[in-house]
Amino acid sequence: MDNNFLLETPTAQELFHSEAENLPIIDYHCHLDPKMVAEDHKFRNLTELWLGGDHYKWRSMRTNGVDEKYITGDASDLEKFLKWAETVPYTMRNPHYHWTHMELRTAFGISKLLNPETAREIYEECNEKLQQPEFSARGLMMRYNVEIVCTTDDPTDSLKYHKITHDSGFRVKMLPTWRPDKAMALENHATYKAYIDKLSEVSDMSIESYHDLIDALQKRHDFFNEMGCRLSDHGINEFYAEDYNETEVNDIFQKAIHGKEVTNEEARKFKSSLMLDFARQDAASGWTQQFHYGPIRNNNTRMFHAIGPDTGYDSIGTPNTAINMARFLDKLDQERHLAQTILYTINPADNYMVATMIGNFQEGPNPGKIQFGSGWWFNDQKYGIEEQLNALSVLGLLSRFVGMLTDSRSFLSYPRHEYFRRILCNLIGSDIENGELPVEEMPRIRQMVQDISYYNAKKYFKF
């Protein structure tokens, strides 16, 4: 993993080092804890920084036969780290092997390979550095030249940590992102009623009808807008585009908040209505809407009850979503309420479908108004990134792509931007050396690399 890691040709190397390597990072979708940024959290050790909440690593450790005690259990931080170090040599050809050593190199200047023989030495060296101010939460963001991060926040969130960070004068801009998934989750009527009660409290209004629900969400949407929010994000199993009427939707909402069972057909109608209303709010505010679709979450019921959601028991789904996606986007387009939109698929089998879908709704004067989002979740590795870039290239305009994001809870995930930029430069460099792109157009090619790495996102989101 030297200076030219993943850069297979001299042209790729030159493009990366001259055009992409030193550009700032705009991380427009992540799951960082805003409280840790506001309070400039100091990490007690490498285990907290590296393994806490990282269900990517947890999956690999389980696959390697590590007992749950050393993953999410009550083992000591050192014991957990040593079990990760035992696992790393078995991750060869898994992106963990690349990410692990990139993070050690870029954050701590450590070029040794992590394995059981080097584990304690690396652990102690990293822990010693973590005591220094430049290795705090904010220090790591500045180390990686981060310019903007957009967190993921529920409509009921007070956003107080965003305000604290803003008022502190911290040079990295931290903006909220509107994530209203819980407002859609009416299948579990017990938790849904509690959520509606909380939304009612923070919006300072009674929510007795579907119309009230939209009004309350609009109040919170306006508040998020005042706090600098410019994006929404929606984590959905699939797109919903059922036929419904207002009376039906209100009746379904009434059933949910009064503890009655909602059928699957009713839930789909409710979600179809709510997704359109979300989109209309975004369009009115000039926001960009993001849709992450397709996962099957929390597949292991026993472990869900033991340690909760988002702990590494999710997989790629295969929803038949193309028709509903088209209907949803077309409905908004007909109303002239289609905001800037980014579509992320978790299933690479949908790459060509999404790459062609976005072309149906492009329009001037906004270049790349509808985007095919970067390789997501199980696809943010070398092959997944290449497949997304290639699909977008042959069926759209790669030059207008808004680029990479971390989608991570970790302050050590920023090397994923470098990883992406290296892969991008390698693809383009190979095309040039193969005679598929003209050397005479190098000024435009250089600008394209810069744009995809940084400038397209800055212009697209108007940051």
Image (tube, rainbow, N blue to C red):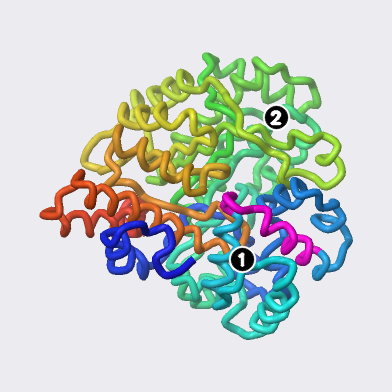
Image point 26% across, 60% down: which residue?
11
Q: Residues within 10 Å of mark 2 (few under 14, many from 20)?
A: many
Q: Which mark is residue 161?
A: 1
Image point 75% across, 61% down: which residue?
86
| x then y, percent, for residue 189 | 77, 30
Q: Nearer the viewer, residue 222 or 376?
A: 376
| x then y, percent, for residue 198 | 72, 45
Residue 335 higher or lower than 205, as above or below? above
Assess whether residue 82 is covered by the magenta stretch: yes
**Span of residues in magenta:** 80-95
Q: Nearer the viewer, residue 16 or 222?
A: 16
Report helix, strand or loop for mark 2.
loop
Dot 2 or dot 1: first in sequence order is 1
| Kind of residue sitting beneath label 2 | Leu
Quarter of the image containing the C terminus? Answer: bottom left
Report helix, strand or loop for mark 1.
helix
